[in-house]
Image (cartoon, rainbow, N blue to C red):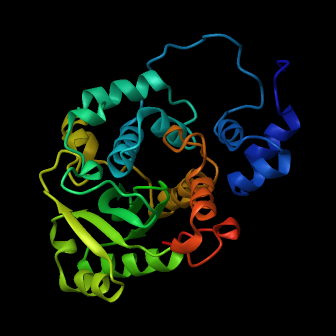
């Protein structure tokens, strides 16, 4: 065991055998959640040889590529922030691999495209509650599952749900639950102009909650509905399920977002986690909040 190790063989075996959430194990053993993720996915409890034992570019499976691409398109975070967040589920992911993947799909430079989160027709958001909403299909052995995602453009907090279909009624209910779950009110939304965001249920909820709204064109190259990776991976591969079942998807989906919101530090937030940044916003100006975020938790449901 190398001198800088924060775990021993017994702890590593306990991590591999435990079904407890990653954050709970990290707190129990006083280690970083990334360390828990690393050992949970290792085949043994032994240290790997130190040094550069692998190339900077590694091969990602089609499901892993889809995950990396969908996260970038849904959040529009800088490369390093995407890397830090994705390494929670993909401990083997390297910066070089992620950069090459984004280069191959034309999304390596945020400045190269017209981004829906960089809408030049309006002033940039300055207070929490300005959310970008989108939906994305995920293939499982049980069929297509729709991922609903809301991303605060200021605090980077992410809220997500899984549903069997994509409808205006469901997205309106999603917006209602989003507004209820946050310690501050949702005051504005940004979406593409697909039918689910044009329907009467979604409009009704926005008006009832006094939420402003802006559209971006559906042909926007950042639209998460455009699965460009499907063409590059190949239709035969893309038709095969990326997850064995809905339970397989659920097994890490909500835990991923929970750790991202409360554990992962982002460069774009000056080294704070999204939750810590929310607390900092509250400390500066609590008038925008309806609850103290310091004791707030986000319970993601399917």
Q: Is residue 47 above or below residue 241?
A: above
Q: Is residue 35 above or below residue 217?
A: above
Q: Which residue sits at x=80%, y=51%?
A: 27
Task: Tell me where residue 130 sits by quadrant.
Answer: bottom left
Left or right of 269 in this view: 151: left
Q: Is 116 situated left or right of 43 in this image?
A: left
Q: Residue at x 20, y 41 (%)?
A: 228
Res. 203 image quadrant: bottom left
Q: Position of residue 241 (x, y in %)?
A: 35, 51
Q: Vertically, is 35 above or below 18? A: above
Q: Position of 208 compared to 195: left or right?
A: right
Left or right of residue 220, residue 55 in this image: right
Q: Is residue 143 visible?
A: no
Residue 169 screen position, x and y as percent? 28, 83
Residue 256 can be seen in this image = yes
Q: Position of residue 141 (x, y in %)?
A: 38, 58
| Residue 212: quarter of image | bottom left
Q: Residue at x 43, y 67 (%)?
A: 129
Q: What's the residue at 55%, 30% (across, down)?
A: 92
Q: Position of residue 113 (x, y in %)?
A: 20, 38
Q: Depth check: 128 or 247 in front?
A: 128
Q: How many marks can you see?
A: 0
Looking at the rendered image, the quarter that the N terminus falls into is top right
């Amino acid at each position: 065991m190398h001198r800088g190790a924060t775990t021993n063989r017994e702890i590593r075996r306990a991590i591999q055998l435990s079904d407890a959430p990653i954050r709970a194990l990290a707190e129990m053993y006083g280690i970083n959640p990334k360390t828990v993720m690393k050992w949970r996915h290792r085949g043994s409890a032994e240290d790997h040889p130190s040094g550069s034992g692998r190339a900077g570019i590694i091969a990602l499976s089609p499901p892993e590529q889809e995950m990396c691409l969908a996260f970038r398109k849904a959040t529009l975070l800088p490369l390093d922030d995407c890397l830090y967040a994705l390494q929670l589920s993909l401990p083997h992911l390297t910066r070089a691999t992620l950069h090459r993947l984004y280069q191959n799909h034309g999304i390596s430079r945020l400045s190269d495209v017209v981004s829906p989160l960089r809408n030049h027709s309006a002033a940039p958001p300055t207070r929490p509650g300005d959310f970008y909403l989108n939906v994305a299909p995920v293939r499982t052995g049980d069929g297509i599952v729709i991922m609903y995602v809301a991303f605060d453009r200021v605090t980077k907090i992410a809220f997500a749900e899984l549903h069997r279909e994509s409808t205006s009624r469901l997205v309106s209910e999603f917006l209602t639950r989003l507004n209820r779950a946050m310690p501050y009110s949702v005051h504005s939304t940004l979406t593409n102009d697909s039918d689910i965001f044009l329907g009467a249920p979604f409009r009704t909820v926005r008006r009832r909650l006094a939420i402003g709204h802006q559209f971006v064109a559906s042909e926007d190259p950042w639209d998460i509905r455009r699965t460009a990776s499907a063409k590059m991976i190949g239709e035969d591969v893309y038709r095969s399920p990326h997850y064995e079942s809905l339970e397989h998807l659920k097994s890490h989906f909500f835990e991923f977002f929970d750790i991202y919101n409360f554990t992962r530090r982002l460069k774009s937030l000056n080294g704070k986690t999204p939750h810590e940044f929310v607390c900092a916003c509250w400390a500066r100006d609590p008038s925008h909040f309806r609850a103290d975020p310091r004791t707030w938790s986000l319970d993601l449901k399917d």
